[in-house]
Every structure is written in structure tokens, then in C-alpha cells.
Amino acid sequence: MAEMLLFHHAQGLTPGVHAFADDIRAAGHIVHTPDLFDGRTFGSIEEGLTYIGEVGFDAIRERGVRVADELPAELVYAGFSFGVLPAQKLAQTRPGACGALLFYSCLPISGEWAFGPWPDGVAVQIHGMDNDPIFVGEGDIDAAREIVATVEDAELFLYPGNQHYFADSSLPSYDADATALLTARVIEFLQRV
């Protein structure tokens, strides 16, 4: 059994994020789903990003980082899109990390946006769609490929399609087939870390 800290995307802690967490719990794992937006959800990515911009990207990322203070060190950190920011920061900087699951987004491990090198012994999976205009078009896929090329236990999974939030069953972008495969891969990952 693994214990996961799962961060939501820019539309908030939606029913689809809850449903994904419940699927992981049903496989026998512990999943924490903090609400970084104090109960707010948004109808679009743009509305969510506007809210994040008003509060401050760094401030919301640090809310997520502080959540981990109340939890054990041996966690798998996971994030959907914007939620990758606190998840990846924790995976790379908090001692005891067991793994990282990065959905639809990825930060580089070198250069201006990096939290530093990837820590030894921390497994990582990165998932995105092969024609997602954000994941592919904005360069996150390049950061993912950098991690896979340099980290011993790193995997990049690409799914056919152009949706960003494809694993959120409460949104129009949901892709049931891709989500089923992603979920199976995540459960396998959690069983081995």
C-alpha cells in the first residue's frame, strides 16, 4: 500500500479529481486530496488561472507544499496540471519521497524553472496526450523527456488525443479509454514504489 498526496488542477478540486482519487483508494492505497482553492471550482482553465494569478502562483504552490508538513515523509506526490507544481517541488525537495506522478504537466530539472536535479531513488511517471496544446505545445513534453533521459526510474506515457484534463470524469475533456489505461499504470506504479 502506498500513500499519495494528490493535487488538483486549475479548475479546482472537481468531482472528477475526487473520482480519480476514489479509484486509487479502491485499489488499496491512501490518497490525500487537499483543496488549494478553499472550495472554489471554475468552469474553465482560464478562469482557474485568473484566480491563481490573483492569489499568486507561488502562494498557491506553497499552500500545497505546507500540506505535506502534516503528513508522513514517505509519500508519492501527484498532481494534475497546475497541481504538478507543488507535487514536483515536494518530490524533488522533501526528503523521503517514494515517487511522483505528473499528469498533463512537467517542469524541467535544469534551467530557470527547475527545483534542482531529480533525487536518486525517486521513481516518476509522466502522463499526457500526444497532441495536447498545453502539454506538447508549451514544452512540458520536453521537460518530461529530459527527466526520462536522465532519471533511472522514469517513464513518459503519451495517449492519443488533444485534451488537457483527460482523466477528469466531470469535465467535457474526459477520455474514458485513456483514463482507464492511465489508472492501471498508476496502480501498478503505486504497488511497486
Image: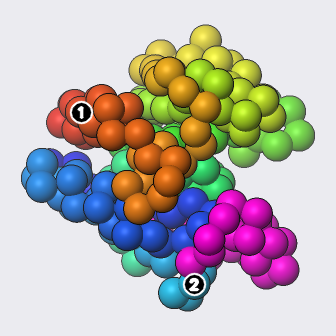
Tell me where the magenta segment starts and ends, as one range.
Answer: 41-68
| Residue at 56%, 17% in the rendered image | 148
Q: What is the secondary structure assignment of the residue under circle 2?
A: loop
Q: Read off the residue under disc 2.
A: 40
Residue 23 drawn at (x, y percent): 21, 53
Find out whether residue 46 is within the magenta segment.
yes
Dividing the picture into quarters, in which one does residue 11 lie?
Answer: bottom right
In x, y percent, where is residue 3? 26, 56
Of residue 99 and residue 188, the one placed in the foreground of this image is 188
The residue most toward the front is: 172
Q: Is residue 75 left or right of residue 50?
A: left
User: Answer yes or no: do the residues labelled 2 and 1 have beta carbons within 8 Å?
Assistant: no
Q: Residue furthest right?
A: 112
Residue 120: give x, y in percent of width and height: 50, 29
Query: Residue 36: horizontal and vertical position, in percent?
Result: 56, 77
Q: Which numbered disc covers residue 47?
A: none
Left or right, 4 with reference to 187? right
125 falls in the magenta region: no
Which one is in front, 74 or 168? 168
* Marked residue nearer the N-terminal end (2 or 1): 2
Residue drawn at x 24%, y 33% is 184
The residue identified by callout 1 is: 184
User: Residue at the spot x=23%, y=38% of the render?
Assistant: 187
Mark 1, Cα crowd under 10 Å, few <14 / some 14-19 / many 20+, is some
Where 61 sits versus 174, above or below?
A: below
Identify the image quadrant of residue 38: bottom right
Q: Indicate the secondary structure of the residue bearing disc 1.
A: helix
Rounded to the nearest angstrom, the CA distance separating label 2 from label 1 is: 29 Å
Whether residue 182 is visible: no
Amino acid beneath label 2: Arg
Q: Is residue 25 left or right of residue 113?
A: left
Position of the C terminus, as image quadrant, is: top left
